[in-house]
Image (cartoon, helix red, strand yellow):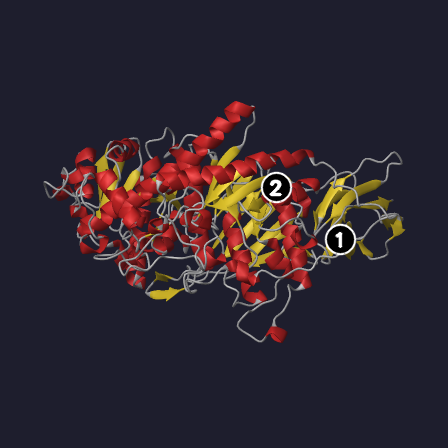
Amino acid sequence: MRLDPDLPDNYHPALFLAVVMLGGLPLLLNAEPPAFPEDAAQKLERTSFQTGKAWSPLGNLRADVAMVYGLGNGLAERVASWREHGYRVHLMTGVSWGEYQDYLYGRYDGVNHEDNAQTDRNGRKIGHGGDVWYMCPAENYGTYLCVGVQRALDAGVEAVHLEEPEFWARAGYSEGFKREWLSFYHEPWQAPHESADAQWRASKLKYFLYRRALQQVFAYVKAFNVRTGKNVRCYVPTHSLLNYAHWCIVSPESSLARLDGCDGYIAQIWTGTARTPNHFRGVRKERTFETAFLEYGAMQNLVRATGRSVWYLNDPIEDNPRHDWTDYRGNWESTLVASLLQPDVWQYEVAPWPERIFGGKYPHNVKPEDRKAIPPDYASELQVVMQALTDMKQADVQWDCGTQKIGVLVSDSLMFQREQPTPSDPNMAHFYGLALPLVKRGVPVAPVQLENVTLPGFLDAQRVLLLSYQGQKPLTPEVHPALADWVRKGGVLVMVDDDQDPYHRVREWWNDGGKNERTPRRHLFETLGVKDGDFAQAVVAVGKGGVLWLRESPVQFALSAEADARLAGAVKMAADKAGQTWRETNYLALRRGPYVIGAGLDESVPGEARVVKGRFVNLFDPELKVQRAVALTPGARVLLLDLDAVKSAGPRLLASACKALPVKRDDGQLAWTVEGVGDTPAIVLLSTAKPPRSIQLDQQPLDSFTYDAAEGLLYIRFPNEAHPRNLSVEF
């Protein structure tokens, strides 16, 4: 995961991992505890987490997959420790940075490669702590990564995750980068800050270099699969396009889905990315939920119609250790709800670094004696939700929200215009000025990947699209005929552009390599068959659809309430033309099978709060109490289990703050194998029409339970232990 952008360069999350002194695990009858039984659904890899440590009670999240981090420090032993405890095991390692000093200092191939460290215009190497530098990936660097990955293949990992291919926008001044420039462009290097054209070309080269490095490793793994008959998969954990652009980083993003051997992504979105401030109605502040909703949506659009898959990351804390547990918890609930409001995705990385969550004390900016370990109720809440996330592949999906089928087009080139001499808006208002006015009105707007519009069926889910070429440009001419075809079939395009972006004049395909003054907006209008003078009326008909042009900068729509309302009015007009009924709400709600996910919106439209009525337990409530009415007031975040949607003739497990796998017994009693994070409180919720006669945990009577006869619910409580135990209930 990336670090908080406000932290110093020498800050590294490893410095804040708790030092865990592990004693012997409790033994039963003087024997080693049994392995956790096989879970047949585990092969679906519904949930995962990343860790740099061997198995420990604090890391025992009982997800389907443990992603062992890093190529050194006893890799084979760490892999074996997780496999022995019943986990599927993947490798995750940094691709742009890591403990790769063997490469840097020539111990790998006899050649010093320090001149391949990313370097800014002042000659400073850009670091991730100590002498862990961000790399300009030469081809020999890709070869070096393959050697390290082979160690993981030898250890038997089932997948390889190459994390965070990142090239800082302020970089591009190292000797290694200059060599790559000459090889790529066949012309001498130009200082990126000296012209928009040089900055654009530097970004395109950075975009290419990490795509090349990843393809080297993917090809290596694919060749390994051919030799061995195995099926080791390759994924790229990466921040969203929106965050990379906001933090001024260039990464291959959507282009990776076209690489041979790329199986998909992990969407690295969490509090640290989503709390980055942005503008709405002229107010700059953190909007964690809304930003996360757009980030997760952008990542889903990387894979839609590509055949690739994506996991969504959630982090119960974040890289910045200076916040307290209340801050971490509220922001985690916001990002989690935002991720669940993307119903096409059902795989999750439930935590990075679980040891720092369940073993760390925060905040770090107070005296050590004032730092607090994770509150027990938050530890329970986390485990309840982590288990619920294994059940999110639901066919029944129903929205309760504003108008649907509206998107904002985004291009990977959002990352190309972020540095001197003429950077795009520092707060990304050219994007958020178009997206936030819709989200704040309960419209589940989707960031739609411009590079993917040529894929068959990719735009079928959209009826209205907003587009600006301020702050981004179309990377290929092929996208314009695809957009024009979508409009002619009935889509409505809202173009927001004043043609003033200086990057319109870089040497590119839309101006014949800089030979004329055509802008990409004008090329698109030519493809659509419309002229600038046609826009006396609001929407110009094109086939069965139409085009609306707002001749102003999209940044303006983030800076005042008047402009925000004006944009909403234009989108309503476009929706009417597209045959969509316009609706605004002050909440977003979604049903996924028996689960209801909801968020109340602040800075939204006036009106009473939406009240969801029924019989629910909120899985964010560690007591799992029954609620008959849940109000989506501004700032509310809920993950509800609809008790009436999970009725059954016999007793049924509804929720648990531990892994609970059913065990068949000859005597007909209900039994589960249970296991969780050591020394955290477990709660198990069952629906049952009658109270239990007895409950046993590892053949010992358990009295810590309550039965709610009116609701038909049985609550069982006990301390979690990090080894499997038998929980049985006799009726």
> Up-down: is 455 above or below 449?
above
Return the mark for residue 69: none
In whole angstroms, how far apart are the C-alphas of marks 2 and 1? 26 Å
Which type of secondary structure does the marked residue at label 1 adopt?
A: loop
Residue nearest the observer in this picture, 577 or 143: 143
Label 1 sits on what residue type? Glu
Residue at (28% x, 41% y) in the render: 493
Label 2 sits on what residue type? Ala
Return the mark for residue 76: 2
Residue at (32% x, 60% y) in the render: 124
Which type of secondary structure does the marked residue at label 2 adopt?
A: helix
Q: Residue furthest left?
A: 516
Residue 142's quadrant in the figure?
top left
Of tags 2 and 1, which is closer to the observer?
2
Residue 625 in percent (x, y) is at 70, 57
Q: Image quadrant for the C terminus?
A: top right
Return the mark for residue 721: 1
Residue at (14% x, 43% y) in the render: 532
In the visual, does 59 lie left or right of 637? right
In the visual, does 411 lie left or right of 158? left
Q: Residue furthest front?
A: 110
